[in-house]
Amino acid sequence: MFGFIKKKLGLEAKESLKVRESIDRDELEDLLLEADVNYELVERVLEQLPQNINRTQLYNSLVSIFDYKANWIDYRSKQPFVEMIIGVNGAGKTTTIAKLASRYKSEGSRVLLGAADTFRAAAIEQLSRWAAKLDIPIVATKQGHDPSAVVFDAISSAKAKGIDNVLIDTAGRLHTQVNLGNELQKMVRVANKAIEGAPHRKLLIIDGTQGSSAINQALAFNEMVGIDGIIITKLDGTAKGGSILSIADELQMPIYYIGIGEKAEDLMKFDIKWYINSILDEIFTVEE
């Protein structure tokens, strides 16, 4: 299950492997760039390191990228805990909502979905199918209806039914679409009217294959509504697992989960130490 990042550094599995004590800076630079680590970040990492780098030195350098103050929000801190899921079309937003719902339900929480992406009929249908599959209630309406009304109704229903977690889908939008941006801001305001302080967590879904484009989207969405954390998707289908380093360095926000497949259970809590050690396992393992 954990091998996906190891495969994404462009290193194929070998029958005969050995662990090396150090790596040359030039070779390390090539590996990190191939794994889609931002060039400027690679240069900053390398300038702190000697010509021949051992595992401990590189571990300390990479882990320091995540050494920033992040406002982590516990999804068990409120009841109902309202999360708004944001992102562009194609990032895996609706599927990620289903994965979160499945995870919460498996932990014993009562979950409700709000289909507030009324821009696309397909989005409502997709989320409704997931709700039926997971046996979770959903508040939905027809395409073209006011998404803020869905937000209010979903939260109100959750309050009345003693629901623990509310997951609200939103229309995929580009940060340059002003009207949809204003609509998203209205949805946030309406959520706060339904329950003061809601949405308690605004999660941005980032496609891990998009590199700097995803970072620019995140910065714009954060300015628009204030993003509380990130979920990085599609890491099972990319050769760019190092993009997480760039995303963390640029955004300095909590990375809550990473998506590694299409199944409901294919959502992992992000663990910094595991992630870095997975990279180092590949860098310091070579063919004999």
Image (tube, helix red, strand yellow):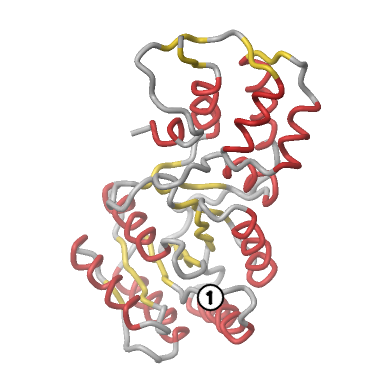
Decide if residue 250 is on the left or right side of residue 199: right
Query: Is residue 157 placed above or below 95 in the rendered structure?
Result: below
Query: Is residue 86 placed above or below 32 in the rendered structure?
Result: below
Near mark 1 (Cα within 10 A), the count class, few <14, some 14-19 or many ≥20, is some
Q: Which residue lies furthest to the front in this view?
A: 288
Kindly identify the amino acid type of the residue bearing the numbered disc 1: Arg
Name the residue located 60 percent from the left edge and 43 percent from the top edge: 36
Q: Nearer the viewer, residue 270 or 9?
A: 9
Quadrant that contains the N terminus: top left
Name the secondary structure under disc 1.
loop
Q: Nearer the viewer, residue 63 or 88?
A: 88
Q: Where is residue 79 in the image (x, y as percent from the top left)?
A: 42, 61
Name the residue located 42 percent from the left edge and 64 percent from the top edge: 93
Q: Which image quadrant for residue 47? A: top right
Q: Which image quadrant for residue 102? A: bottom left
Q: Position of residue 25 (x, y in %)?
A: 71, 22
Name the residue located 76 percent from the left edge and 42 percent from the top edge: 40
Q: Position of residue 254 (x, y in %)?
A: 59, 48
Q: Name the residue under label 1.
A: 173
Query: Is residue 277 placed above or below 161 in the rendered structure?
Result: above
Decide if residue 279 is on the left or right side of residue 97: right
Name the residue located 46 percent from the left edge and 9 percent from the top edge: 288
Decide if residue 258 is on the left or right side of residue 49: left
Q: Where is residue 34 in the image (x, y as percent from the top left)?
A: 59, 38
Q: Which image quadrant for residue 52? A: top right
Q: Residue furthest right?
A: 47
